[in-house]
Structure formats: C-alpha cells, structure tokens
Amino acid sequence: GYMATGWIAMGVYILSGIGMIVFGYIADRTNKRKCLAIASFLLAGLFLFLSTIFFGDTGDLILIALAMVFVLSIVGPLWGYMTTFVKERQAAIGIAFVNSVGNIGGFAGPLMIGFLMNSFSSSIEISWIFVSIILVIGGIVLGTIHSGRSPNAS
C-alpha cells in the first residue's frame, strides 16, 4: 500500500544521501572528482538499463535504487570539478551556466519521458533506456572535457 511505498522511497533516499556524502568525501580526499563523477554517471546508467532487462519487482527495485544512489552521487564531485574551469572572478557565470543547463534538462527530460511513454504503449522501460543512454552520454562527455587549470589551483 501507500505506507510500504513511502518506506521504500524513504530507504532509497536515505541510501542516496549516504552515497552523496561518501562520494563527496572521497572526491575531496582523493581529488578525483572527475573520475568519481564519470563513474557515477556510468554506474547510474548501467543500473537503470539493467532494471529494464531483469524481471521481478525486487530485482528492479534494487537496481533502480542503486541507479538513484549514483545519480544523486554525481552532484558533489561534478560541482567540485566544474569549479576548476573558471577563475574566481568568473565563478558566478560558470556556475550559472551549469545550473541553466541542468534546469533545461529538468524540463526536457520529463517531457521526453512522457513523449516516449505515450509513443510506446505506456512502457516505462523505453523511458528508462532513454535516461540510461543520456547518463552514459553524460559520463562520456565529461570524460572528454579537460580543465585548463590544475585541480589544486584556487
């Protein structure tokens, strides 16, 4: 029922919060922000894609929960890495640009998911595959970006 759904969702978000803290801590300690962000993108895409293959509620729930942990774990290392691109005086512009791109994705992603679900007989699997492809593309694009500064530079 509704209570069970709430408990499951709460558990996923608690795990995701722990994942965000752990990934942020590791990123700060090892200074491997880019690697951790790429790994989070790719693992999130992998787990979400695998949830479309396996049949069974428990397996799907675990895979989607893992995908959620890694999606939210992208945030800390990615923002930490993105600050290596801009000088201190231009930081607001760079942060605003990244935030704007994220907001566009926050609009376009659900729109595309709804379009795919309407186009393919309300199948959520097609939408999950689309999102998993976008996550993998995000990891690949991040892997091709090189900052002009040393990550230790202020």
Image: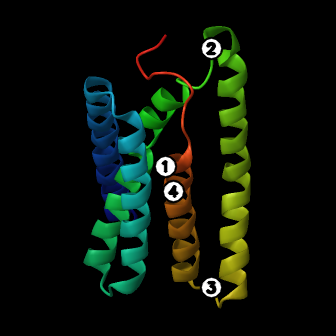
Q: Mark 2 points at which residue?
A: 87
Nearer-N-terminus badge (1/3): 3
- Secondary structure category for the residue under label 3: loop
Name which residue type carries label 2.
Answer: Lys
Mark closest to the chain's N terminus, 4 or 2 = 2
Q: Can residue 75 be seen in this view?
A: yes
| Kind of residue indicated by mark 4 | Ile
- The CA span between labels 4 and 2 is 25 Å
Residue 64 in the image: state x and y as whole percent: 37, 66
Residue assigned mark 3: 122
At which x and y percent is residue 96?
Answer: 71, 27
| Badge 3 or badge 4: first in the primary sequence | 3
Question: Mark 1 against mark 3, which lies toward the viewer?
Answer: 1
Separation (CA) of disc 1 from disc 3: 34 Å
* Badge 4 vs badge 1, beta-carbon distance below 8 Å: yes
> Disc 4 and disc 1: Cα gap in Å?
5 Å
Give the residue pinned by disc 1: 143
